[in-house]
Image: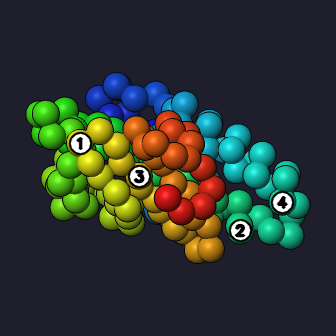
């Protein structure tokens, strides 16, 4: 349960916390557990810690997207141009390990590395996969 909301009866969702300090509640917790399970199945039991790294890097990238889109909406016609970690942290203080590799008016790419695993997300770019969190750097 989210301790802040459960005290007033607003949150009935179970929450989980991974080994890297990220907290997932409700549908996000369920999706996180499924994702870790799928990755662990693909990697085998001997590399279970790697699946935790993969899932955490993906979750960190995913968590940055709402702040990025808020930044672009607040930035008027300049879109993502000028985006920085400091600007994103003004929107969401929890964002700390995201790396912005490019940011123009109409596109951006961000990435996160946990342990040996790096995942990235590109939006609006001319090359690569757009709108999907993918393994590897931008």
Q: Assess whether mark 1 and mark 4 are in contact (beta carbons under 8 angstroms).
A: no
In percent of width and height, residue 87 lies at 17, 55
Q: Is residue 24 visible to the viewer in this orientation of the structure? A: no
Q: Label 3 to label 4, Cα distance in Å?
A: 27 Å
Residue 49's disc is: 2
Q: Secondary structure at mark 2?
A: helix
Q: Considering only order in the chain, which callout, 2 or 1, is on the residue closer to the N terminus?
A: 2
Is 8 located above or below residue 63 in the figure?
Answer: above
Marks 4 and 1, how far apart at CA: 39 Å
Disc 1: which residue: 105
Label 3: element kind: strand
Quick one: label 3 or label 2, which is nearer the N terminus? 2
Which label lies toward us, 4 or 1?
Answer: 1
Any part of residue 65 in sight: yes
Other residues around mark 1 within 10 Å, as few (<14) / some (14–19) / many (≥20): some
For disc 3, the neighbor class at 10 Å (few under 14, some 14 to 19, many from 20) is many
Q: Are marks 3 and 2 in contact (CB under 8 Å)?
A: no
Q: Residue furthest front?
A: 126
Q: Residue at x 55, y 52 (%)?
A: 58
At horizontal 52% and vertical 67% (from top left) the residue drawn is: 113
Towards the viewer: 39 or 129: 129
| Quarter residue 66 falls in | top left
Task: Estimate the x, y position of residue 117 in percent, counting from the top left.
Answer: 62, 67
Given residues 50 and 129, the one toward you in this image is 129
Q: Does residue 35 appear left or right of residue 29 in this picture?
A: right
Which residue bears the numbered disc 3? Answer: 109
Residue drawn 76% across the image and 52% down it: 39
In this rendering, the label closer to the viewer, 3 or 2:
3
């Amino acid at each position: 349960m989210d301790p802040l909301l459960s005290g007033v009866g607003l949150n009935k969702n179970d929450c989980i916390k991974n080994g890297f300090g990220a907290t997932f509640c409700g549908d996000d917790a369920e999706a996180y557990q499924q994702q870790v399970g799928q990755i662990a199945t693909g990697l085998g039991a001997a590399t279970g810690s790697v699946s935790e790294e993969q899932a955490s890097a993906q979750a960190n990238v995913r968590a940055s997207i709402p702040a990025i889109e808020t930044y672009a909406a607040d930035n008027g016609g300049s879109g993502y141009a000028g985006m920085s970690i400091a600007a994103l942290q003004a929107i969401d203080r929890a964002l700390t390990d995201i790396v912005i590799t490019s940011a123009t008016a109409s596109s951006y790419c961000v990435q996160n590395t946990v342990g040996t695993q790096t995942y990235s997300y590109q939006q609006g770019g001319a090359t690569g996969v757009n709108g999907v969190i993918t393994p590897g750097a931008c």
